[in-house]
Image: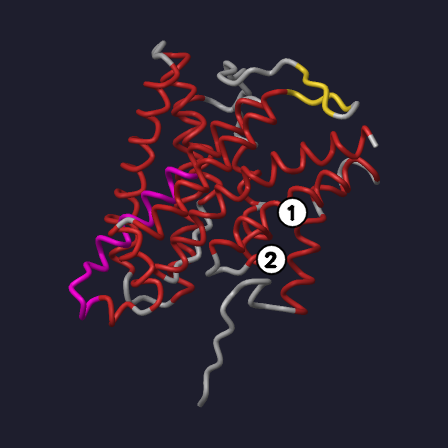
Amino acid sequence: MELFIQLTLTGLTNGAILSLAALGFVLIYKSSDVINFAQGEFLLVGAYITYALIVQFGLAWPLGMALTLAAAVGVGVLVERFVLRPMIGEPIISVIMVTIGLSSLLRAIVSTIWGTLPRSFPAFIPSQPVRILGATVGADRLWAIAIAVIMLGLFTVFFRRSREGIAMRAVADDQQAALSMGISVKKIFAWAWSIAAATAAIAGALVANIVGVSGELSGFGLHVFPVVILGGLDSIPGAIIGGVIIGLLQTYTGGYIGQGLNQVIPFVVLILILMIRPYGLFGQEIIERV
């Protein structure tokens, strides 16, 4: 029972962080039909920017995180304006290849500036052990769950209540109808990429707080793809639920069967979902008639 509780809390931590990263992926796809293969690198860049501001420049945590989010938003806007906007109207495979190239470019920039050696990340979340129903878990994992849930809640309110969030939903449903209502689709694209970069930066800081800073953080972003395929490429609730499912599956597999297989199980789920339900658990099924 103690092992089950410990694995469950660890899985929920991973799942909540995956949901944050997957949220940005879904937003980009919903608003622009672009599959962003650089989402893991956004996570990596966010973690290293946080590290640079806090450790190398000695800023206080609140200021450092605020500047990290500002920098992430700036990166998202620049990528949308100078990398993706010129690709509007091009074949989808060309856009996919551009995002793959972008991931390599961001990874190379990080390696050039900070090197390839892992670095210790100064803990900004308490990490002392906590006893829950006989199981011992780090307080940093409980804080990570709470922070991720709060951020997901704030973004949900943003999409449902704010003017920009409603405009983003309108563009996601029908770009032509949104244009006819006076909504700037290009502006919405910029919003989507900014939010994707910001959510990835938050996820990167949370992961780095637990495991440290290294180039392997971008590998964590690879698990975003099974999450969004499971939940549905165009479903925000699906990104949240898919993140939790994949996080728990990974942890239970690693705890009960053995390490190594837990890195494979998300992609096994991805293949099964594509075979059984290609649109995911909550994705919108589109039927084209010819």
The numbered disc on residue 266 is none
Local secondary structure at mark 1: helix
Q: Is residue 119 left or right of residue 90?
A: right
Q: Is residue 290 left or right of residue 247?
A: left
Q: Residue at x 71, y 36 (%)?
A: 8
SS label for mark 2? helix
Apparent side of residue 134 relative to residue 76 in the rendered image (left or right): right
Q: Quadrant of the C terminus?
A: bottom left
Q: Which residue is mark 2?
A: 230
Which residue is located at x 54 percent, y 55 percent?
Answer: 238
Residue 196 belongs to the span the image colors magenta:
yes
- Name the image quarter holding the N terminus: top right
Q: Quadrant of residue 128?
A: top right
Q: What amino acid type should be assigned to the residue bearing mark 2?
A: Leu
- What residue is shown with label 1? 246
Q: How is the image coloured?
A: secondary structure
Tell me which residue sits at (30%, 31%) in the image: 71
Within 10 Å of disc 2 (Cα), the crowding (few <14, some 14-19, many 20+) is many
In this picture, is 241 found above or below 200?
below
Classify 114 as above or below 247: above
- Please give the count of numbered marks on the rendered protein: 2
Q: Nearer the viewer, residue 173 or 70?
A: 173
Amino acid at pointer 1:
Ile
Asked whether the beta carbons under mark 1 and mark 2 sit within 8 Å of each other, the answer is yes
Q: Nearer the viewer, residue 107 or 26?
A: 26
| Magenta stretch in the rendered image | 179-199
Q: Going 48% across and 75% down the picture, which residue do you hit?
A: 286
Q: Is residue 264 magenta?
A: no
